[in-house]
Amino acid sequence: MTAKELKKRYSQLSDQELVRIALKDSKDLRPEALAIMKTEMERRNLMTDASSGIEIQLKEMSRKTC
């Protein structure tokens, strides 16, 4: 999926679906998808432990590519 497609898909999910993906499936997502998910969660004011976990995963992925 392209970034544009991911943005559209995440924007169409319910709050509950978005949080569920963030909590259960985010470890399997690409860094770009994680960043898009984090942005969508921030837009909806869904800053939860899930979004904190996404931030940690993004930082770890960033370290591995350096």
Image (tube, grey):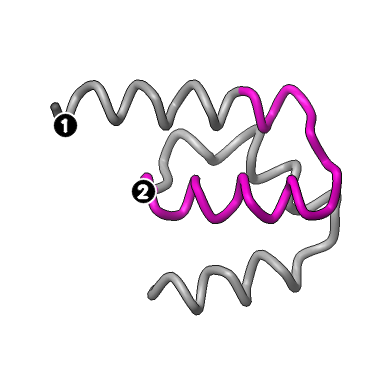
Report which residue position mark 2 lands on: 30
Q: Indicate the amino acid at tag 2.
A: Arg
Q: Name the residue located 28 percent from the left edge and 30 percent from the top edge.
A: 62
Q: Judging from the image, what secondary structure is the residue with disc 1 in?
A: helix
Report which residue position mark 1 lands on: 65
Q: Position of residue 5 (x, y in %)?
A: 50, 78
Q: Position of residue 51 (x, y in %)?
A: 67, 32
Q: The C terminus is located in which quarter?
A: top left
Q: Name the residue located 44 percent from the left edge and 26 percent from the top edge.
A: 57
**Magenta span dominant secondary structure:** helix
Q: In the figure, is residue 53 to the left or right of 19?
A: left
> Disc 1 or disc 2, which is closer to the eye?
1
Q: Name the residue located 84 percent from the left edge and 61 percent from the top edge.
A: 14
Indicate which disc residue 41 carries: none
- In the image, residue 23 sits, relative to residue 15, either above or below, namely above
- In the image, residue 10 sits, relative to residue 26, either above or below, namely below
Q: Which residues are magenta?
A: 30-52
Distance (Cα) linking label 1 and label 2: 13 Å
